[in-house]
Image (spheres, grey):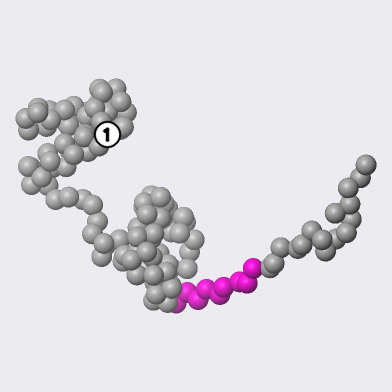
Amino acid sequence: MKAKEYEAIVEDCRASGMTIREYSERNGISVQTLHTWIRRTRKRRGIKDDRKSYEEYRAIVLECKKSGQMAKDWCAAHEIRYTTYCDWAKKVNKKEGRAKIDGMCGIQRTLRERQPEPKVTANPTLCEIRR
């Protein structure tokens, strides 16, 4: 498919008022393919990719953690989708380690020891079989 053809489809998608998923399903186009066409169209027009770099979302995660608020509340106040924030936090914690990130934000977590499960034989009434 030529660039002009998929640019026309991208414009039609935008004009339709539907989400990308809805438009894709209605027109028999893969969601991933439509996202690729949108990215290519933006690049041809010289529009900067609006996805955040690792450093940008790392800074957002640190800011949220330093605020002391629950992440969901902080995201609502800053108009960030909570699920998007969770994806960023997961990447940051995986790359740098949760303990390091928490330490940078002044958060101290204490590990709780698990209580052992009670043994069934410790209570003889549980072991009785009634006939």
What element does badge 1 sit on?
helix
43 in magenta: no
Give how far across and how far down residue 24 sits, in percent.
Answer: 27, 28
Q: Residue at x 12, y 39 (%)?
A: 41
Question: Closer to the camera, 96 or 35?
Answer: 96
For disc 1, the marked residue is: 31
Q: Image quadrant of residue 34?
A: top left
Q: Residue at x 30, y 61 (%)?
A: 57
Left or right for 98, reference 8: right
Q: Nearer the viewer, residue 47 or 35?
A: 35
Q: Is residue 8 left or right of residue 33?
A: left
Q: Amino acid at mark 1?
A: Val
Magenta stretch, residue numbers: 106-114
Q: Quadrant of the C terminus?
A: top right
**Who is closer to the viewer here, 24 or 47?**
24
Give residue 104's quadrant in the image: bottom left
Residue at image location 24% in from the left, 56% down from the top: 52
Would residue 125 appear left or right of 90 to someone viewing this image? right
Q: Quadrant of the N terminus?
A: top left
Q: Position of residue 9 (x, y in %)?
A: 16, 28
Q: Is residue 66 visible?
A: no
Secondary structure character of the magenta stretch overall: loop
Question: x%, y% of residue 5?
Answer: 9, 27
